[in-house]
Image (cartoon, rainbow, N blue to C red):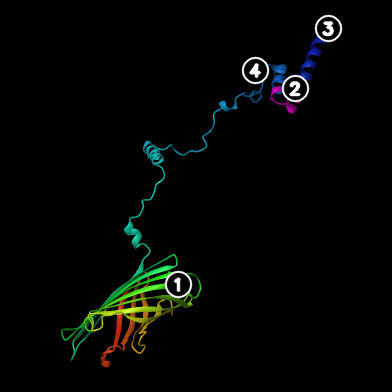
């Protein structure tokens, strides 16, 4: 009877311990779970989650990326670049600095006439300019040569350089210096030189129209003529440019040089051109224009006026 009661009590104790252990598993952490498992059935029956690794870093980690490692050549090239440092662009040569920023155009034209008079005429030239810090430098050359009945009838070259210095955003926007040299085998001089300087006045400037007036003083000397001294003159230069359409432009220029001592003696040159873009991508245009030169100081009135009509192909760069 006593032994039977002892077995009943032992069975009740095991059942009670099992119930208590389940409650502990639900409410406590893994350490308590481990202790309860030991009490109820021994350490060998404890669940795996109850064991806590004291050093989490010892556990194997999954790779974050599946990219392959660089090859030996790639690693050597990377090391070479790191040792060389950042790439430094070489300093440009002085000739590159000199020609940088220049824009301009080249002009070529010719005309032929046949019949009673056989005439061949060639005309060409170029101009370049560079704008910088509100200033501008311009150079221009024009040349014309003609033969009539196989005899030279025209041989003329004009070279010019203009330097503009900007002084602000007002209408009186700067000063200028200009030099012009002329060679003409059919005039009474070998070479004519004109030097001029003064101020600039901006008449109009917008997206389509640009009109500039230059006013100043000048001096002219004709080498190889009967009068080789310097002649003081006034200097008036008017230029107008207007864009008609995306492919058409009109330009006009007037240069006027009256003598200061005798204003009745003067020189005037007037030009007008119409440009039509043939190939905008390559900068090719057709130019049709006229130029009239008049000089009252020439004794023969029939020789005072020269009129040129021209058609040229122009390449702009």
Q: Position of residue 106 (x, y in %)?
A: 31, 72
Q: In which quarter of the image is residue 226?
A: bottom left
- Mark toward the viewer: 4 or 3: 4
State which region is magenta.
20-31
Along the line of sight, the residue nearer the viewer: 304 or 3:
304
Q: Which residue is drawn at 54% across and 31% down?
A: 61
For label 2, the residue is 21
Q: What element carries label 2?
A: helix
For label 1, the residue is 174
Pointer 3 with pointer 1, Cβ within 8 A: no
Point out the image quarter for the N terminus: top right
Q: Which residue is drawn at 83% across and 10% down?
A: 5
Q: In this view, does 116 lie to the left or right of 130?
A: left
The answer to which of marks 2 and 1 sits earlier in the sequence is 2
For label 4, the residue is 44
Q: Residue 221 carries which label?
A: none
| Location of residue 132 with respect to 225 vertically, above or below | above
Q: Residue 2 carries which label?
A: 3
Point out the image quarter for the C terminus: bottom left
Q: What element carries label 1?
A: strand
């Amino acid at each position: 009877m006593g032994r039977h009661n002892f077995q009943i009590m032992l069975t009740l104790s095991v059942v009670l311990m099992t119930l208590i252990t389940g409650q502990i598993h639900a409410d406590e952490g893994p350490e308590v779970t481990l202790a309860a498992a030991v009490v109820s059935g021994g350490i060998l029956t404890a669940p795996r989650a109850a064991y806590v690794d004291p050093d989490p870093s010892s556990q194997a980690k999954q790779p974050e990326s599946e990219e392959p490692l660089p090859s030996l050549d790639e690693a050597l090239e990377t090391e070479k670049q790191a040792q060389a440092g950042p790439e430094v662009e070489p300093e440009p040569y002085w000739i590159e600095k000199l020609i940088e920023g220049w824009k301009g155009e080249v002009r070529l034209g010719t005309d032929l006439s046949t019949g009673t008079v056989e005439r061949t005429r060639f005309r060409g030239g170029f101009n370049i300019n560079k704008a910088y810090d509100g200033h501008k430098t311009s150079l221009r050359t024009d040349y014309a040569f003609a033969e009539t009945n196989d005899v030279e009838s025209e041989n003329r070259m004009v070279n010019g350089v203009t330097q503009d210095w900007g002084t602000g955003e007002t209408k009186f926007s700067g000063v200028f210096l200009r030099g012009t040299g002329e060679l003409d085998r059919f005039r009474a001089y070998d070479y004519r030189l004109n030097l001029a300087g003064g101020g600039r006045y901006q008449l109009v400037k917008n997206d389509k129209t640009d009109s500039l007036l230059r006013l100043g003083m000048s001096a002219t000397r004709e080498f190889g003529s009967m009068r080789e001294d310097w002649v003081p003159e006034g200097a008036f230069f008017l230029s107008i440019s207007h864009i008609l359409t995306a492919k058409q432009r009109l330009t006009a220029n007037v240069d006027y040089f009256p003598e200061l001592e005798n204003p009745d003696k003067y020189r005037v040159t007037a030009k007008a051109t119409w440009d039509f873009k043939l190939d905008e991508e390559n900068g090719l245009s057709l130019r049709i224009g006229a130029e009239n030169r008049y000089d009252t100081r020439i004794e023969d009135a029939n020789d005072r006026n020269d009129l040129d009509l021209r058609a040229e192909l122009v390449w702009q760069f």
